[in-house]
Image (cartoon, rainbow, N blue to C red):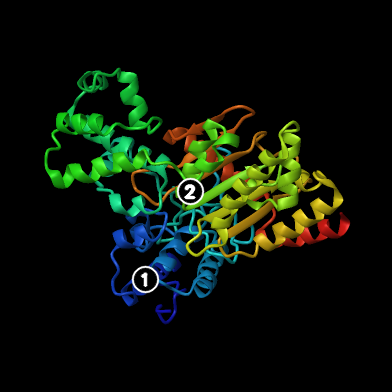
Amino acid sequence: MARPENPLDPESGPVAAFAVALRELRASAGALGYRAMSKRSYYGFTTLSEAAAGRRFPSWEITRAYVAACDGDLQEWERHWRKTSALLRLTGDTEPEENGERSPPRPSDAIVPEQDRSMTGPGAPGPVAAGGNAVRPLTPPPPDKLVATAQAKTPSWTSFQSRGGPTVRRILLGAQLRRLRERRGISAEDAGYEIRASHSKISRMELGRVGFKERDVADLLTLYGVTDPTARDPLLELARDANSPGWWQPYGDVLPTWFENYLGLEEAASVIRGFELRLVPELLQSEDYTRAVIRLSHPRAPEADVEQRIRLRATRQERFVEPGAPKLWAVVDEAVLHRPIGGRRAMRGQLAHLAQMAKLPNVTLQIVPSTMCDVPVTVPFTILRFPEAGLSDVVYMEQLTSAMYLDKRADVDAYQMLWDEISVMALQPEESVRHLQVLWRQT
């Protein structure tokens, strides 16, 4: 790994020296552009460039994303990051607590599993100025700048046609139609009049909650001034693809309509984070455990329906052992593991299955121990992240006969903060696996 002779030289400052090492790493990777690096991670090019600017000490998650984008040695850089962080703590150059808020966890407390998650998670020491003075953390740009940046991006339509299901295609097409309409200053009412529909239908189309008629999309594109065939044709093709059936169509007899949207989002997600306090997460359930859960949920269902539901869940699980699988980060309340669903044999099998799944490089499992009595949430939730620039994160919460999908920035940010707090409270991944082994012996 390229680095200065003495990266902890006090004359240059540990943060500045760390930034020099990051810049030399990028140079050794062929001077990779920050925009290209952002496409390899879940951080924007501004965040990555700030990490190498030397004005603030980046968190380990940002450093990990930077190093991974440059194909650097993660283990060596983790040691380098920890040494720099330790030096900053020794000199007292850490971010102070303000307004009674808890400071970010120290490296010894942070969740840093062996596998590369490349996602926003519990941070490490807060940002520190290069000269040693404590500074406030980086703040996101104002909403209007975010909107302008999003509008400036041109999604690659072919990239998600090969991997996203119809649900995601509808959302992406709807988002593009909304950007085009707003760019022309056309109201939803006027757009609805153009296709002989109400403004509420335009809203549903732009949110991706309904199917698209190719004729309606063509009329809207004309209204929005998109007349060049090279710009129109990909959008019209996307409209046709958005109406294609999903892989889950054969399970329509046992699949609630409100859950189909989630399957489409799950299919296209690159990162899935979930907190569960009632049952083992569906994507980590063993077959016997799944069968017991389905029988409890549908006690009057015929055997054929039960088996079909099991096959549906197994099909979803198969993605996580395939090449290029999404990253799954599950946090489970310990009470779930003491609930003997399906009996002793099924529960022992489930515990063993969790331990095996936790060994996958794309799966991270944490357990919130029963000694933690102040878990700040009472309902399970899932946060889905997508690689496409046109899609925001989505928070999913399932109810008895329906589900909630939250994608507004304020809602997603609130659940992201909640997720960070829960994951810090939980056992680290290695400790969680050891705890599973103890529970298995006790069950």
Percent across and percent down for residue 105 are 59, 53
Residue at the image position 41 percent from the left and 31 percent from the top: 209
Residue ID for mark 1:
20
Residue at the image position 48 percent from the left and 48 percent from the top: 267
Q: Residue 110: which numbered mark, if any?
A: none
Is the C-beta separation of discs 2 and 1 under 8 Å? no
In the rendered view, would you say 234 is above or below 224?
below
Q: Amino acid at mark 2?
A: Glu
Q: Report crowding for label 1: few under 14, some 14 to 19, many 20 or more residues within 10 A (C-alpha).
A: some
Is the C terminus in the top left, top right, bottom left or bottom right quadrant? bottom right
Residue ID for mark 2:
267
Percent across and percent down for residue 129 are 42, 57
In the rendered view, would you say 67 is above or below 369?
below
Between label 2 and label 1, give the one nearer the viewer.
2
Residue at the image position 64 percent from the left and 43 percent from the top: 308
Percent across and percent down for residue 334 are 75, 47
Q: Secondary structure at mark 2?
A: helix
**With 108 as the anchor, is 18 left or right in this view?**
left
Percent across and percent down for residue 429 are 66, 59
Q: Nearer the viewer, residue 304 or 126?
A: 304
Q: Amino acid at mark 1?
A: Val
